[in-house]
Every structure is written in C-alpha cells, then in structure tokens.
Amino acid sequence: MSELSSDPGSTPTASASFESWGRYPTYSAKIIPINWQNDFPGVIAGVHDGALPVGMGRSYGDVCLLKDGNLLLTTGMNRLLNFDSETGVLTAEAGATLAQILDFSVPRGFFLPVSPGTKYVTLGGAIANDIHGKNHHVAGAFGSHVTEFELVRSDGTRKICSPTENLDYYAATIGGLGLTGVITWAKLRMKPIVSRMIDYEGIQFHGIDEFLDLTKQSEKIEYTVSWIDCASTGKNFARGVFMQGDHSKVPAELKQSPEPKLVFPFDAPGFALNHTTVSMFNTAFFHKQVKPRVTALQDYEPFFYPLDKVLHWNRLYGRNGLLQFQYAIPWESAREGTIAILKEVAKSGLASFLAVLKAFGDVPSPGMMSFPQPGITLALDFPIKADKSFPLFERLADMTRDFGGKLYPAKDAAMTAAQFQAFYPQWEQFARYRDPLLTSSFWERVTGDRPTL
Amino acid sequence: MSTSPASTTALQTSTGPQKILVLGATSGIAEATCRIWAKQGARLFLVARNGDKLAAVAADLKTRGASYVDTAVADLDDTTQHPTLLAHAINSLTGMDVAYLAHGVLGEQPQAEQDFGHAAQILHTNFIAPVSLLTWLANYCVQRHAGVLAVISSVAGDRGRKSNYLYGSSKAGLSAFLGGLRNRVDREGVTVLTIKPGPVKTAMTAGMKGSEKFADVDKVAQTIVAAIDKRRDSLYVPFQWQPIMFIIRNIPESIFKKLNL
C-alpha cells in the first residue's frame, strides 16, 4: 500500500519470471530498472552473475532472458529528447516504444522509417535485434536509419557510436542482441507522411511462383508482405494473400491512435490450436478476401499492427507458449528452399497459425550480426508441443543451413550452438565487442559462454 | 469510474497556456502528469535534486510540446532556500496557475524503527518541507485570489500500519495540513487538492510480481490533471481506494492492532 513511485533514488528490485513473447522458456531473474541515462552501471555495482538490458520482452525466445541473472529493464528510460521537424531526426531514450514514438510523430506528420509487426517494442530493442519491416526491399533494416546512439559499458565508459565515430561499436551494437552495452539514447531518421492512411492492395496467389511474380511486379511499392497458408497441400499448396501498400499521398488529418481495447483474457486450452482449427482459419482468411484482388484505403494501424489490437494474443497459444521459426534464404536457393520447408511443415502436421512470407532486398545493414539478407524470409508460429516441435525445428534449421540461409535470433529458442555458429560465422569477431558483464540465455545456449566475474 | 476520461480543459483563470510549477519533477507520477501538460502546450518550471535527470525530463517535455520549460536543481529539504526558489520560479513562469508538489521519500521503515535520525528525515522531507513550500505558495495565491495547490499525499496516511507507519504518519500529517489550509484559503478563491494514490505501476515496479495489479501511471496522471481542471478538493487514485480506505479507517483498533498490514 506504500507509494512506490515517490522516490527514484530508492530502487526496489524483485526476483520475478520475465516472460518473452513466446512464453518459452521461462526463467526467473532479478529485475533492475534502468530509468535514467546515468543509472548504468551504478545500479549493478557488486553484481557478479551477469546482466542483460531488456525492453518490452517482445522477442519470442531467449534473447531477452537471462536465467538467474539480472535483467536491466529499460522501459522507464523513455524520454523524447529532441525532434528536428526540418530533418525528421528524433532523439529518444532507448526505452521509448515505437508506439510512444508514433503517438508523438504521426500527429506531426512523421512515420517510422522501418516498422516490425508490433509497435510494442522499444527503440533499443529495435536496434539490438536490427528489426526489419514490410519495406525491407526498399529501406533495409532498422539500423540503416539509426544515425547515432550512446552506448554505456559496464566499466563506465560512454561511447557515441555512428557511421563516423566508433564505427566498430556502431556495427556490433546494431543487431548485437543487447550484449555490447546499454544503449541510452539514439537518433532515428523519421519519414514524412501527409496522411495516416495506406493505399492498400490485397492479391490472392497460388504457389511460390505466383508469389515471386508479384514480388517482382511490386518492387516500387513501399510495403509488401504475404500471408501464406501452410496447412494446405495439393492444389492449394502455398496459396496466400499478397498485401502491399504505400502511404497515401492525399493529405488528411493526422490524429493520434486510439488505445487498444481488446485483451485476450486467458490462456487458451491446449486443444484450441490444432491442425483442424488452423486449417479452418487459413481457409477462412484466404476467402475473407472474396475477390482475387482488392484495393482499399486503410489506416496504418491495422495495416502494420493487425495483432496489436488484441493485447496478449500470445495467450491464444496456451500455457505452453509458442515458438517462431524465421529464416532468410538467399535468392539462389530461395524458391527451392521455401517449397521444401513448407512441404516439411505440412508433412509434420504441426499447425502454424500465422505464416508470413516476404522478400528481403539488397540494402545492406550496418549491423555486423544483422539477420536480413537478400532473398526470401518466412516466419512460422507454432504452439509448443514438447515431443514434436523441437525435432521439427531442428530439421527445419538444418534444411535452412543446407539452403545457405540463417535463422533470426529474435524469434528463436531452439537452434543449436553448431547451427548458430554456421549461420553467423562472424560471431567470434562480434564476441570481442561484447560487454564482459552482459550476456543472455540465448548467447549462453549458442556459444556455451557464461561470463565468470 | 466517475471522472470523465482525460479531460483536457485548461483552467480559465488566465489567458494563454497554463503556468505550472512542479516540485519533485523527476518522480514517476510527476513526469507522467507533466507529459499531459506538455502536450497541452503548458509553461512549466521544474524542480528536482538531480541535474542530469532534470535535464532529461525537461528535454522530453519541451520535445512533447511544452511552450516553455525552465528548471532549477534544488534539494527541497533545505527550507531556507524555499522563498528565493519559489520567487524565481514564478518570475520565470511570469505567474503561476498551478503548483504541483510531487516530491517525497518512502524511507526504510525497519531503519526508522531503530534510528530516530532516519525517522526525522522522512518526516522532514514528506511533511516539514511541504509545509514550508505551501505556506509561501498559499500566501502568493491568496494575494492573487487564484491558483491551485495540488499535493501528492498517500493512502498510507489514512491509517498507520506497522509496515510503513513513518511514511504513513508523515503523509497523515500532510493530509491534515492540507485540510486545514483548504479550509483557510477556499474563500480566497484558492484550490487545495489532496491526491492520495495507491500503489502505482511506474517503470520502477514494472515486471515485479503483483505489479500487474498496480495502477497505470498514465491513467493516474490523467485523473490528477482532470481533478486539477475541475478544482476538486481531494482524490483517491485509482478511485477504488476510497471505499477500501473507508473500510480500513473503520476497523476497530482492537482488531486492527492484531492484523498483519
């Protein structure tokens, strides 16, 4: 009943299980808030069991977890420090979420340069995972639009990182999974818009070749993404809906977004998502679009963040949680690899509720460990079934490797150390930039490395 | 909830943006409240102990749309500085419509039980210092026959409990002082608002067990802004604390002393 917020100087901490979005695995850790740019490393003085900066916990697996360690929660460090309405450059603290940034910027006529499928991620998390969006083929990944940031190391040194200053730490931190230090603030180059609306077009396709044709025809459209039905076989194999859009050029009122209303209220029972229900959903989704091609003027919220409307939609997957599997396979083997992996998924009988297919472009990211690369990326969601999911993931990861691709750490809780090291051969070079105090359960899993201090 | 959501009606006492003095501007509740005022284009004068934190808060509020932001780094425990500080703040703001007192310490109850020095420190920060500030501010407002003094007390002041009775008694004293002050200045056109928050989900408590049940700091801030705009006398945030505290205040002492609260 005491008023806990009255004094930022007395910082209560508690040991709690911090859930990632996939709710698997679950580890308990001590949560230490980083509310101010000068809190780190002071708040962690005397700590000897490793730490990891975390934000909203929207990564799916264990990149935002540290078993029995210290999670440095940055969401209170969320101030907007400056906005230059001439250049569109926003300076914000790393714990600011993309939702908070949009609430601020959209009424002023600016949009995120790159946005993932949820706006409930922090700026620091977006940099640390070098997230990508529906405009990767024209804009590249998030890191390409981060012009400068401050990185604080556990020895107290503070580095300004940019393409012209401390370039090595700039490259290691973008896509560096929070392991190179704590990002306190960053400068993000925003993009001018004149309307909240998106000129949307949805096109049904049947099979990967039609998808590739549509991808080619849409090179100049800013945003493209496809939903794909991965439960169907036979003549419906790899059918889907290709969704594309541009910011509307027709000036309109730029008001703030309403708050989300729906909250998925409970853990769905284990049987809620099975092959039958997912097939029914997929068939319904495919035919929701009654014509092969539809156009519409759509608000940016449902276009970019269809699932954010339902807070905690991850509960749909039940208490066991869900896992995503996301690969990027280069163009040489993208078609063949995608077909083979979709067939393997269909054969497994494990349901993937949301399968998202997208072509990555060739805009390079400054990030040393960045995930996106030219080719095709496919993201699949699976509810976790202990005996069946992990053997499937292992097969899929091996297939990905054989097709010259790699997996996305932000969506992973399953790849082996050998697989990771094959996907990211630069990992040893990257490890030289890791802060000695910082680690994650992911990093320990894929490198076998836990710092002893 | 009886209050209308996010009332943004500005005070009608002066023309132009509201002029607001915030004491303890780096506290979680104060910062959330100031963001609402910044969005409305208010003029803000911010006071806090830590210069770096204050600079970050000031930059944020300026970026979000405050028409004017000035700051002073000060330890409000030093009551001798209050008259100079407050005069400077009001001069900088070119007047004052609202003074918002949000500073305070939770303290360490176990330590305060053994060490009167610590107990006295809690009482000084949470009670003596606000009395000094409010005495000066109330006299300023009375002269102008206008102004709102909005002060964060706590539900913990409604009844002493063994888990935090030093903090609680400092807030009880503050609440009683505010009641008396209100009784004195109401007829002079001055509003005194006693704000009694329950546990609030700030950045600091996020991720803790049980913190999902704490009040959302942005909603608390919206409620406070609405109460100031409506010139209310007192406020429990969230409102559920009003019936809860009614019950807690009325538990007979013979029973209450045996409870683990």
Image (cartoon, rainbow, N blue to C red):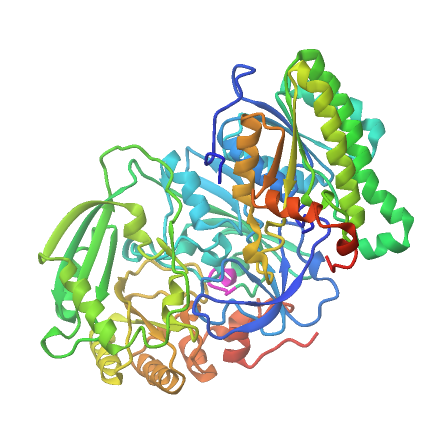
Q: How many tags in the picture?
A: 0
Q: Residue at x 77, y 46 (%)?
A: B167
Residue B124 occupies which quadrant of the picture?
Answer: top right
Residue B35 occupies which quadrant of the picture?
Answer: top right
**B72 w.r.t. B114: above or below:** above
Is residue A9 toward the left or the right of residue B232 in the image? right
Depth check: B233 or B258 in front? B258
Q: Residue at x 71, y 12 (%)?
A: B143
Q: Residue at x 23, y 64 (%)?
A: A227
**B195 w.r.t. A285: above or below:** above
Residue B225 occupies which quadrant of the picture?
Answer: top right
Residue A135 rendering spot, x and y as whole percentages? 29, 54
Depth check: A264 or B249 in front? B249
Which segment is the magenta one?
A: A171-177
Is residue B174 toward the left or the right of residue A343 in the image? right
Residue B100 rendering spot, x and y as whole percentages? 65, 31
Depth check: B197 or A129 in front? B197
Residue A175 shown in magenta? yes
Q: Is residue B60 visible?
A: no
Residue A380 shown in magenta? no
Q: Is residue B31 visible?
A: yes
Is residue A160 toward the left or the right of residue B187 in the image? left
